Image (spheres, helix red, strand yellow):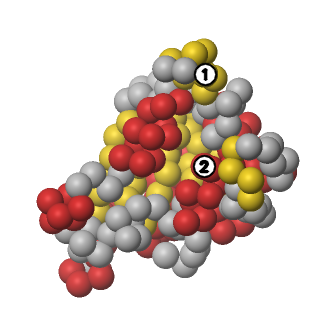
Amino acid sequence: MRKKKIFILLGHPDEDSFNCTLADEYQRGAEEVGHEVRRMNISDMQFDPVLHHGYRLVQKLEPDLLSFQENMRWCEHFVVFYPSWWSTMPALLKGLFDRVWMPGFAFQFTSQFSWKKLLKGRSATMFVTSDTIPFVQRLIFGDTTNELRKGILWFAGFGPIRVRKFGYLKHFGSTGRRERIRRKVYSLGRKAA
């Protein structure tokens, strides 16, 4: 198995969460087999998640956002863990992408209808947790991962992009079930999948 450069982002603002546990397991599995891993936890990052002037004016990036961009350029595989809140990612995670996914970094428009994908050659895995059964969530609300999967990652050239959903954790999140999920994520970390 070829060793990869993996960048892990814990996108849950609370480090005392099941998402943090899963990120720890993935990292442990990846490092045990020799993958090179860098990690950032959104809760540790210091940045303003609001685009105060939209994209009309350039807002200077804080050091943590510059580090995030450098980690994205460095990695071959990007892994993000986050909960689905109101059928999307947490606001702080969305704010992170609003701030860093800029022309010249992630993409560059070449005309009104075409663009260069500047982060090609990278794959990604999204781990999304929810209190709803993933099938039911999709049936009622549609693809709740499309914003990040297609609108952000694919737009910049990532591929393939895998989505791994774990749901109904609040009501049927027994210790045994959570342990099985932890073992699965650990195994996926070993494979960089």
Q: Which residue is most to the bottom?
A: 171
Residue 15 in the figure: left or right of residue 88: right
At label 2, counting other C-alpha atoms closer than 10 Å, the crowd grade (few under 14, some 14-19, many 20 or more) is: some
Q: Secondary structure at mark 1?
A: strand
3 or 57, which lies in front?
57
Q: Which residue is mark 2?
A: 97
| Residue 180 x/y as whole percent | 27, 65
- Vertical comparison of 30 with 25: above or below: above
Please provide percent x and percent y for residue 165.
29, 57
- Identify the residue shown where x is 40% and y is 38%: 150
Residue 189 visible, this orientation = no
Q: Is residue 113 visible?
A: yes
Residue 9 percent location from the top left of the image: 57, 53
Residue drawn 24% across the image and 61% down it? 141
Residue 175 lies left or right of residue 10; in this view the side is: left
Tell me what residue is drawn at x 32 percent, y 69 percent: 130
According to the picture, the residue beneath numbered tag 1 turns out to be: 109
**Judging from the image, what secondary structure is the residue with disc 2 in?**
helix
- Quarter of the image where one finds residue 111: top right
Q: Position of residue 77 (x, y in %)?
A: 51, 35
Q: Amino acid at mark 2?
A: Phe
Task: Count how many numbered circles sit on residues in the image.
Answer: 2
Please state if 65 lies on the left or on the right of 38 as rendered. Answer: right
Quote the CA–CA distance across marks 1 and 2.
Answer: 18 Å
Label 1 or label 2, whichever comes before in sequence order = 2
Label 1 CA crowd tier, 10 Å (few <14, some 14–19, many 20+) = few
Residue flagged by tag 1: what amino acid is it?
Phe
Left or right: 192 with respect to 100?
left
Which residue is at a point 42% across and 66% down the rendered structure image?
Answer: 83
